[in-house]
Image (cartoon, rainbow, N blue to C red):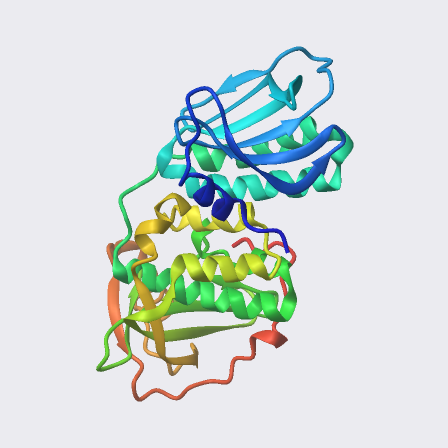
């Protein structure tokens, strides 16, 4: 298996070359005009060097606040040869650039005769993620919630394949975290050691889906130095075949940025308990159907309440048996 571009860039960064040159290493992927290289430039910026033939469209010179791409000639074995040079110019996005570079290499491996087009097409798909504004760092409770949802996603992908990502609709604004054609699942996490109390936000979160029943999957997590971080879990899901870009795009909807992964790696969790509950008429909840008179929910704002799951009856939720919805949108 090919080594990740991020790890190659980290290795090369330990020995930055002299001004004007690159410290490079073969990527293991060849374009029609030669080996693609992973490199670090004189400023310590991670770079992908893609050899190309004579450009029919003239030289390329494009840059944004985070990335740049240009065509230029580099000396290889004493001979000047044209290259497409894709580099990350924002230090905080170097790790994320490693994932982009992996996708670039995959695209070139599939179409070595059209290496330049492969680079441009891959960059076009990733550009919005690189240019989006980053918010403040997420706290431990927010990361615990994302860890819980990623754990459910991981279980789904193992059973249903990479397409299971389409069921994760919470970060896209759906009222439920996971939507299937026969049910929906809301995921909650708590880091409280003493009890299984989860917080419900709004009057729609535990409202019944349009089709099938609603389940609550609850995780009791513990912060521990020997646990798993959210960046670790992201890598596990990607290793199962989920698109890097698609997963990071969904995570951005939850205000998670891969650019902050180095900070998040220090927050690690272990699962103390994990249970599922059927949200039916016997489940304590605040929804439009449980409030009287009718329409009361529309006149209430900032609804948030806690539910103690400690003595409630659990349900058997087998995620391998759920039916994937075609769209998943609410």
Question: What x and y, as percent, mark residue 211?
Answer: 57, 67
Q: Is residue 236 visible?
A: yes
Q: Residue at x 38, y 31 (%)?
A: 90
Q: Quadrant of residue 36?
A: top right
Question: What x and y, as percent, mark residue 320?
Answer: 61, 75
Which residue is nearer to you in this view: 144 or 92? Answer: 92
Question: What x and y, as percent, mark residue 167?
Answer: 56, 60
Most distant residue in the front direction? 78
Q: Residue at x 61, y 65 (%)?
A: 181
Which residue is nearer to you in this view: 146 or 90? Answer: 90
Question: What x and y, as percent, mark residue 23?
Answer: 49, 32
Which residue is nearer to you in this view: 324 or 24? Answer: 24
Q: Residue at x 56, y 74 (%)?
A: 319
Judge left or right: residue 309 versus residue 236. Answer: left
Task: Check the image and report above or below for 146 versus 256.
Answer: below
Q: Is residue 176 visible?
A: no
Judge left or right: residue 98 versus residue 298. Answer: right
Which residue is nearer to you in this view: 203 or 259? Answer: 259
Q: Total of numbered circles in the picture?
A: 0
Judge left or right: residue 24 versus residue 261. Answer: right
Task: Check the image and report above or below for 220 versus 31.
Answer: below
Most distant residue in the top direction? 58
Q: Residue at x 43, y 67 (%)?
A: 186
Task: Check the image and report above or below for 182 versus 61.
Answer: below
Q: Quadrant of residue 267?
A: bottom left
- The quarter of the image holding the N terminus is bottom right
């Amino acid at each position: 298996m090919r080594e990740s571009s991020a790890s190659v860039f980290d290795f090369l960064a330990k020995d930055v070359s002299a001004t004007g040159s690159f410290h490079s290493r073969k990527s293991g992927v060849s374009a029609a005009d030669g080996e693609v290289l992973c490199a670090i430039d004189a400023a310590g910026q991670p770079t992908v060097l893609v050899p190309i033939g004579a450009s029919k469209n003239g030289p390329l010179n494009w840059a944004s606040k985070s990335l740049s791409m240009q065509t230029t000639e580099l000396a290889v074995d004493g001979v000047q040869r044209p290259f497409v040079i894709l580099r990350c110019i924002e230090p905080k996005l170097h790790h994320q650039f490693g994932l982009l570079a992996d996708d670039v290499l995959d695209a070139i491996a599939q179409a070595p005769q059209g290496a330049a087009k492969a680079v441009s097409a891959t960059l076009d798909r990733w550009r919005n993620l690189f240019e989006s504004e980053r918010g403040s760092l997420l706290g431990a409770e927010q990361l615990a919630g994302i860890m819980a949802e990623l754990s459910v996603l991981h279980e789904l992908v193992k059973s249903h394949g990479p397409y299971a990502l389409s069921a994760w609709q919470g970060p896209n604004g759906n009222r439920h975290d996971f939507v299937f054609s026969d049910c929906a699942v809301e995921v909650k996490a708590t880091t409280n050691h003493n009890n299984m109390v989860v917080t419900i936000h709004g009057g729609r979160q535990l409202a019944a889906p349009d089709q099938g029943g609603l389940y609550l999957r609850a995780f009791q997590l513990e912060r521990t130095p020997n646990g798993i971080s959210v960046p670790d879990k992201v890598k596990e899901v990607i290793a199962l075949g989920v698109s890097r870009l698609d997963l990071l795009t969904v995570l951005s909807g939850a205000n998670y940025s891969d650019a902050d992964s180095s900070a998040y790696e220090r927050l690690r969790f272990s699962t103390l308990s994990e249970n599922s509950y059927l949200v039916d008429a016997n489940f304590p909840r605040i929804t439009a159907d449980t409030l009287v008179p009718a329409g009361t929910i529309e006149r209430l704002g900032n609804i948030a309440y806690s539910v103690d799951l400690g003595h409630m009856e659990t349900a058997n939720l087998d995620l391998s048996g759920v039916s994937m919805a075609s769209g998943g949108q609410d």
